[in-house]
Amino acid sequence: MRAHHPWIGALLILVSMACESPPAEEASGAAPADTPAAADRPMADPDEVRAVTDTWLVAWNAGDTATLESLVAEDVVLLQPDGPVLEGRDAVLDMIAGAYDITAYQQSATTDEVLPVGEHAYLRGTWTVAPTGEAEGDTFDGKWSALFRPGPDGSWQLWRWMWNQPSDQAPTSTP
Protein backbone atom coordinates (compact mmCIF):
# COMPACT_ATOMS: atom_id res chain seq x y z
CA MET A 1 0.00 0.00 0.00
CA ARG A 2 1.29 3.41 -0.95
CA ALA A 3 1.93 5.90 1.86
CA HIS A 4 -0.54 8.76 2.03
CA HIS A 5 0.59 12.35 2.24
CA PRO A 6 -1.86 14.67 4.01
CA TRP A 7 -1.34 17.53 1.58
CA ILE A 8 -3.32 15.58 -0.97
CA GLY A 9 -6.46 16.31 1.02
CA ALA A 10 -5.98 20.01 0.66
CA LEU A 11 -5.69 19.69 -3.10
CA LEU A 12 -8.93 17.80 -3.24
CA ILE A 13 -10.80 20.47 -1.42
CA LEU A 14 -9.56 23.26 -3.59
CA VAL A 15 -10.27 21.61 -6.83
CA SER A 16 -13.71 20.65 -5.66
CA MET A 17 -14.56 24.28 -5.30
CA ALA A 18 -14.53 24.80 -9.06
CA CYS A 19 -17.78 26.00 -10.59
CA GLU A 20 -19.31 27.64 -13.67
CA SER A 21 -18.05 31.09 -14.67
CA PRO A 22 -16.62 32.98 -17.68
CA PRO A 23 -12.95 32.77 -18.81
CA ALA A 24 -10.21 34.70 -17.03
CA GLU A 25 -8.53 37.79 -18.40
CA GLU A 26 -5.49 37.39 -20.59
CA ALA A 27 -2.09 38.47 -19.25
CA SER A 28 -2.49 41.82 -21.05
CA GLY A 29 -5.39 42.63 -18.75
CA ALA A 30 -7.94 42.51 -21.57
CA ALA A 31 -10.68 39.93 -21.60
CA PRO A 32 -10.38 37.28 -24.32
CA ALA A 33 -12.19 38.36 -27.50
CA ASP A 34 -14.75 35.55 -27.30
CA THR A 35 -15.91 36.35 -23.74
CA PRO A 36 -17.87 39.23 -22.25
CA ALA A 37 -15.95 42.12 -20.75
CA ALA A 38 -15.14 41.69 -17.04
CA ALA A 39 -17.59 44.45 -16.12
CA ASP A 40 -20.39 42.52 -17.86
CA ARG A 41 -19.73 39.26 -16.03
CA PRO A 42 -21.71 38.40 -12.90
CA MET A 43 -19.91 37.90 -9.62
CA ALA A 44 -19.48 34.30 -8.51
CA ASP A 45 -22.52 32.79 -6.83
CA PRO A 46 -21.18 31.54 -3.45
CA ASP A 47 -23.70 28.67 -3.32
CA GLU A 48 -22.74 27.55 -6.83
CA VAL A 49 -19.03 27.70 -6.07
CA ARG A 50 -19.52 25.91 -2.74
CA ALA A 51 -21.47 23.11 -4.49
CA VAL A 52 -18.44 22.27 -6.61
CA THR A 53 -16.83 20.88 -3.45
CA ASP A 54 -19.13 17.90 -3.80
CA THR A 55 -18.02 17.35 -7.40
CA TRP A 56 -14.38 17.42 -6.33
CA LEU A 57 -14.92 15.04 -3.40
CA VAL A 58 -16.88 12.53 -5.46
CA ALA A 59 -14.23 12.60 -8.21
CA TRP A 60 -11.34 12.38 -5.73
CA ASN A 61 -12.85 9.51 -3.76
CA ALA A 62 -13.70 7.62 -6.97
CA GLY A 63 -10.29 8.20 -8.57
CA ASP A 64 -12.01 10.05 -11.43
CA THR A 65 -8.95 11.73 -12.89
CA ALA A 66 -10.82 13.10 -15.92
CA THR A 67 -13.13 15.14 -13.68
CA LEU A 68 -10.23 16.25 -11.47
CA GLU A 69 -8.32 17.35 -14.58
CA SER A 70 -11.28 19.47 -15.71
CA LEU A 71 -11.34 21.23 -12.33
CA VAL A 72 -7.66 22.25 -12.36
CA ALA A 73 -6.37 25.18 -14.45
CA GLU A 74 -3.53 24.46 -16.86
CA ASP A 75 -1.36 27.04 -15.03
CA VAL A 76 -2.32 26.09 -11.46
CA VAL A 77 0.17 26.75 -8.65
CA LEU A 78 0.10 24.65 -5.46
CA LEU A 79 1.93 25.69 -2.28
CA GLN A 80 2.14 22.65 -0.05
CA PRO A 81 3.63 22.48 3.44
CA ASP A 82 7.22 21.32 3.60
CA GLY A 83 7.16 20.47 -0.08
CA PRO A 84 8.10 21.98 -3.40
CA VAL A 85 5.90 24.52 -5.17
CA LEU A 86 4.05 22.63 -7.89
CA GLU A 87 3.31 24.52 -11.10
CA GLY A 88 1.01 23.28 -13.83
CA ARG A 89 -1.90 20.85 -14.06
CA ASP A 90 0.30 17.84 -14.88
CA ALA A 91 2.52 18.38 -11.83
CA VAL A 92 -0.45 18.67 -9.46
CA LEU A 93 -2.31 15.68 -10.92
CA ASP A 94 0.89 13.58 -10.90
CA MET A 95 1.35 14.41 -7.23
CA ILE A 96 -2.21 13.28 -6.47
CA ALA A 97 -1.83 10.05 -8.44
CA GLY A 98 1.52 9.28 -6.85
CA ALA A 99 0.57 9.84 -3.24
CA TYR A 100 -3.08 8.93 -2.80
CA ASP A 101 -4.47 5.41 -2.65
CA ILE A 102 -8.26 5.64 -2.91
CA THR A 103 -8.64 2.04 -1.85
CA ALA A 104 -7.18 2.92 1.54
CA TYR A 105 -8.16 6.57 2.11
CA GLN A 106 -11.13 8.81 1.41
CA GLN A 107 -11.45 12.54 1.79
CA SER A 108 -14.05 14.86 3.22
CA ALA A 109 -14.01 18.64 3.29
CA THR A 110 -15.84 21.71 4.42
CA THR A 111 -16.03 25.09 2.76
CA ASP A 112 -16.14 27.71 5.49
CA GLU A 113 -15.96 30.79 3.29
CA VAL A 114 -16.61 31.73 -0.34
CA LEU A 115 -15.79 35.28 -1.42
CA PRO A 116 -16.35 36.58 -4.95
CA VAL A 117 -13.31 38.65 -5.95
CA GLY A 118 -13.89 40.22 -9.36
CA GLU A 119 -13.67 37.39 -11.90
CA HIS A 120 -12.27 35.06 -9.25
CA ALA A 121 -13.61 33.24 -6.21
CA TYR A 122 -11.64 32.79 -2.98
CA LEU A 123 -12.48 29.74 -0.89
CA ARG A 124 -11.34 28.58 2.53
CA GLY A 125 -12.11 25.50 4.59
CA THR A 126 -10.93 22.33 6.28
CA TRP A 127 -10.17 18.83 5.03
CA THR A 128 -9.82 15.31 6.45
CA VAL A 129 -8.37 12.20 4.85
CA ALA A 130 -9.13 8.97 6.71
CA PRO A 131 -8.58 5.26 6.17
CA THR A 132 -11.56 3.38 4.75
CA GLY A 133 -13.15 0.12 5.86
CA GLU A 134 -10.54 -2.35 7.04
CA ALA A 135 -7.60 -0.16 5.95
CA GLU A 136 -5.19 0.78 8.67
CA GLY A 137 -3.51 4.13 8.81
CA ASP A 138 -3.54 7.60 10.24
CA THR A 139 -6.23 10.21 9.76
CA PHE A 140 -4.91 13.52 8.47
CA ASP A 141 -6.61 16.89 8.58
CA GLY A 142 -5.87 20.50 7.98
CA LYS A 143 -6.92 23.77 6.41
CA TRP A 144 -6.93 24.97 2.81
CA SER A 145 -7.45 28.13 0.82
CA ALA A 146 -7.77 28.52 -2.91
CA LEU A 147 -8.38 30.99 -5.65
CA PHE A 148 -10.53 29.84 -8.55
CA ARG A 149 -10.91 31.48 -11.92
CA PRO A 150 -13.00 30.77 -14.97
CA GLY A 151 -11.50 28.25 -17.37
CA PRO A 152 -11.66 28.36 -21.17
CA ASP A 153 -15.08 26.67 -21.17
CA GLY A 154 -16.48 29.00 -18.49
CA SER A 155 -16.31 26.47 -15.65
CA TRP A 156 -14.53 27.32 -12.43
CA GLN A 157 -11.02 25.92 -12.17
CA LEU A 158 -8.56 25.75 -9.31
CA TRP A 159 -5.90 28.34 -10.10
CA ARG A 160 -3.97 29.01 -6.87
CA TRP A 161 -4.02 26.65 -3.92
CA MET A 162 -2.43 26.34 -0.52
CA TRP A 163 -3.04 23.87 2.28
CA ASN A 164 -1.59 23.05 5.66
CA GLN A 165 -1.94 20.66 8.53
CA PRO A 166 -0.90 20.54 12.17
CA SER A 167 2.87 20.25 12.50
CA ASP A 168 2.57 16.87 14.29
CA GLN A 169 1.00 15.48 11.06
CA ALA A 170 3.43 17.06 8.61
CA PRO A 171 4.96 14.59 6.15
CA THR A 172 8.63 13.81 6.58
CA SER A 173 9.19 13.54 2.84
CA THR A 174 7.52 14.55 -0.41
CA PRO A 175 7.04 12.53 -3.57
Image: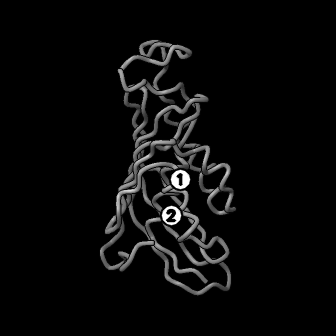
Tell me if 56 is positioned left or right of 148 in this view: right
Q: Is residue 4 above or below residue 32?
A: below
Helix or strand or loop: what does disc 2 sit on?
helix
Amino acid type for the residue under numbered disc 1 = Asp
Q: How many angstroms separate mark 2 from mark 1 (CA)?
A: 8 Å
Disc on res. 165: none
Q: Quadrant of the C terminus?
A: bottom left
Residue 68 location (% of width, % of height): 61, 51
Amino acid type for the residue under numbered disc 2 = Met
Say which residue appears at 46% left-offset and 27% top-offset. 24
Say which residue appears at 33% left-offset and 72% top-offset. 166
Point out the frontmost of discs 2 and 1: 1
Name which quarter of the figure residue 159 lies in. Answer: top left
Return the disc, 2 or 1, that comes first in the chain's sequence: 1
Looking at the image, do the residues carrying marks 2 and 1 touch, with CB atoms under 8 Å apart? Answer: no
Q: Is residue 150 above or below residue 14?
A: above
One can see residue 124 in this view: no
Which residue is the site of mark 2?
95
Residue 127 location (% of width, % of height): 47, 62
Which residue is the site of mark 1?
90
